Amino acid sequence: MEPDIVTTVHLVILGRQGSGKGTQCVRLVEAYGMVHVSTGDMLRSAVAAGTELGREAQAIMDAGDLVPDEVVNGIVAERLAMPDVVEHGVILDGFPRTPVQAQALEDMLDSTGTPLCGALNLDVPVDVVIGRMLERGRVDDTEEAIRLRLDLYESETAPLLSWFEDRGMLKVVDGLGSEEEVFDRLCTLVDGVLA
Ligand code: AMP
């Protein structure tokens, strides 16, 4: 059977670390049935499992630096080829993070004939995300690592906004307000993409 391209959504969610992407992804998955693929979660699982990838990534992650593009591109390409993603679509969280990754994603999706439907940018100011990250207290959330991750976001990831905008795919969502309010805004955009 041909895949139903109208109901299979392939989305990217962008936003600074601490913008609430992870929480909102869980809710979007419940509502729309796509698969949540978080490169941060995949890398943390690899670290916990002590795989070769995990050993390679751990020090980089602890420092708040970026794992090399070719490593991350490889794990995403493998994940996108899995049957659950092919059947239900995906919301990518934490990827792409650099223009090289964005180009790789475009190539991956082109080769499967499932173009990206949109990039949702969950917009939360820097001072708000710093406060949230310090509160959640994850092991890699030291002040120094947070600062480096936010600097990298501005230098590497923020340029992706224009990359997606140039392709008519960028949708900006105000990430301030209650979880419910932000979720409603996201749903309006996803419904628009699916319409
Ligand atoms: P996150 O959970 O998205 O904040 O990711 C945690 C850490 O995993 C980041 O600080 C990076 O070290 C690494 N990481 C996650 N996604 C990527 C990516 N797309 N490219 C490079 N490094 C990544």
Image: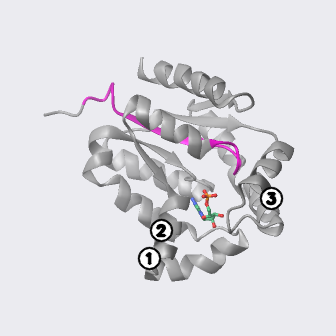
Q: Residue furthest left?
A: 1
Residue 45's tag is 2
Residue 16, magenta (yes or no):
yes
Please tell me which residue is depicted at 33% across the width and 49% down the height of the picture: 111
Residue 62 position within the rendered picture, expressed as x and y whole percent measured from the top left: 68, 74
Between the C-alphas of marks 2 and 3, the distance is: 25 Å
Please indicate whether residue 138 sits to the left or right of residue 132 in the image.
left
Residue 49's tag is 1
CB contact under 8 Å: marks 1 and 2: yes
Magenta segment boundaries in residue numbering: 4-20
Please tell me which residue is depicted at 49% across the width and 74% down the height of the picture: 48
Residue 17, magenta (yes or no):
yes
Between the C-alphas of marks 1 and 3, the distance is: 29 Å
Does mark 1's beta carbon lie closer than 8 Å to ligand 1? no
Sequence order check, earlier mark of 1 and 3? 1
Q: Is most of the magenta stretch helix, strand or loop? A: loop
Between the C-alphas of marks 1 and 2, the distance is: 6 Å
Mark 3 lies on residue: 151
Q: Is residue 153 above or below residue 125?
A: below
Q: SS for tag 2?
A: helix
Q: Residue furthest right?
A: 127
Quadrant placement of the N terminus = top left
Residue 129 position within the rendered picture, expressed as x and y whole percent measured from the top left: 78, 47
User: How many C-alpha atoms fall within 10 Å of the one at disc 1: few (<14), some, or many (≥20)?
Assistant: few
